[in-house]
Amino acid sequence: MVKKILVGEVISDKMNKTRVVMVTRFYRHPIYEKTIRARKKYYVHDERNESHVGDIVKFIESRPLSHLKRWQLIEIISKNKGREL
């Protein structure tokens, strides 16, 4: 089985070893052809509490770690440059 890898922005780091990551994707409406932005939140396991709000991170699908967590952090692509949500 090929595991999915996604990239998104950390929007919450208030939980211990867990980050909430927002992934934004764009697609065209099949009939009206308007570009639509779809956003989804993922709960990502961050074992060393390395990432913080505003960081862009890469994460991979994993076995269920808790009720909502099914993803693990791979790497931090870019750190927050003083930007808050």
Image (cartoon, rainbow, N blue to C red):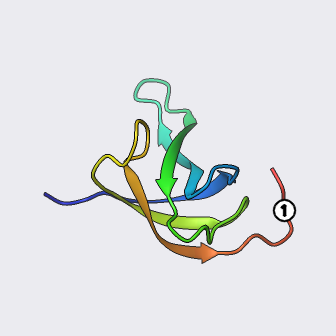
Where disc 1 sits, the SS reads loop
On the image, which quarter does residue 3 sit in? bottom left
The residue under the point 80% across, 50% down is: 85
Quick one: 51 or 36, which is closer to the camera?
51
The vertical placement of 82 against 31, above or below, is below
The residue under the point 50% across, 47% down is: 43
The vertical placement of 70 against 81, above or below, is above
The residue under the point 40% across, 42% down is: 66
The residue under the point 40% across, 36% down is: 67
Outermost residue on the front side: it is: 16
- For the residue marked with disc 1, what is the amino acid? Arg
Which residue position is annotated with label 1? Answer: 83
- Locate residue 20, reporting x and y percent: 59, 48
Q: Relative to 62, is 80 on the left or the right? A: right
Give the tally of numbered discs. 1
On the image, which quarter does residue 6 sit in? bottom left
Q: Relative to 31, is 52 on the left or the right? A: right
Image quadrant in which the N terminus is located: bottom left
Quick one: 59 or 15, which is closer to the camera?
15
Outermost residue on the top side: it is: 31
- Locate residue 24, reporting x and y percent: 56, 47
- Locate residue 73, reporting x and y percent: 46, 65
- Locate residue 29, reporting x and y percent: 46, 30
Mark 1 Cα within 10 Å, few/some/many (few <14, many 20+)? few
